[in-house]
Amino acid sequence: MGSIIIHGHFYQPPRENPWTGAIDRERSALPFHDWNERIHSECYRPNAFARITDARGGIERIVNNYAGISFNFGPTLLNWLEHARPDAYARILEADRESVRNHQGHGNAIAQGYNHAILPLCNERDRRTQMRWGIEDFRHRFGRLPESPPSAGHGGR
């Protein structure tokens, strides 16, 4: 029997107003305050707390989809989740810890360049900075080093 691998690439650009540190209302994200809130409601939270239902539509159990897929989250998005939605943030970190336990030390989370830059288009100094910052943020959040260099976002290294 064959296998299928699902990888989730999750990223939101920083939306904070540099003068206030807050995210301004984004009318295009209505009925939500902003796109981070909207996508959290439609994607990040439903994957962290996925409902498995029985034949009658009742909730049989809640699972953490991140524990069953390969994934990377942009550091700026993880920073927002950590402060604005700590329940989903905690489930993402727990999913990686669970995968490390279940896969002989190999976690589902992978690192990416810090600001989601397209690394092949960066000069050498910027590429190294993006990778160093991405690796350090990953180590800080997941408590381990990534097993490979951060992904280039689009198009490889």
Image: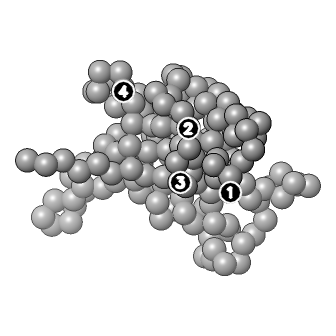
Q: Residue 150 bears which disc, if any? A: 2
Q: CA distance from mark 2 to mark 4?
A: 15 Å
How far across and down, in percent of the image, does residue 13 sit?
A: 68, 57
Reading the chain from its start, which is encountered first: label 3 or label 2? 2
Nearest to viewer (mark 2 / mark 4) = 2
Nearest to viewer (mark 3 / mark 4) = 3
Reading the chain from its start, which is encountered first: label 3 or label 1? 1
* Amino acid beneath label 1: Pro
Q: CA distance from mark 3 to mark 4?
A: 24 Å
Query: Label 1 belongs to which residue?
Result: 13
Which of the 4 image quadrants contains residue 38? Answer: bottom right
Query: Label 3 belongs to which residue?
Result: 155
Residue name at image x 8 percent, y 47 percent? 1
Quadrant of the rendering where the C terminus is positioned: top right
Residue 26 shown left or right of residue 29 in the figure: right
Residue name at image x 56 percent, y 51 percent? 153
Element class at badge 3: loop
Residue name at image x 28 percent, y 27 percent? 102
Does residue 146 appear in the picture of this structure?
A: yes
Query: Label 4 belongs to which residue?
Result: 106
Residue name at image x 64 percent, y 52 percent? 118
How far across and down, in percent of the image, does residue 2 sit?
A: 13, 49
How far across and down, in percent of the image, does residue 17 sit?
A: 83, 58
Q: CA distance from mark 4 to mark 1?
A: 28 Å
Nearest to viewer (mark 3 / mark 2) = 3
Reading the chain from its start, which is encountered first: label 1 or label 2? 1
How far across and down, in percent of the image, does residue 19 sit?
A: 91, 55
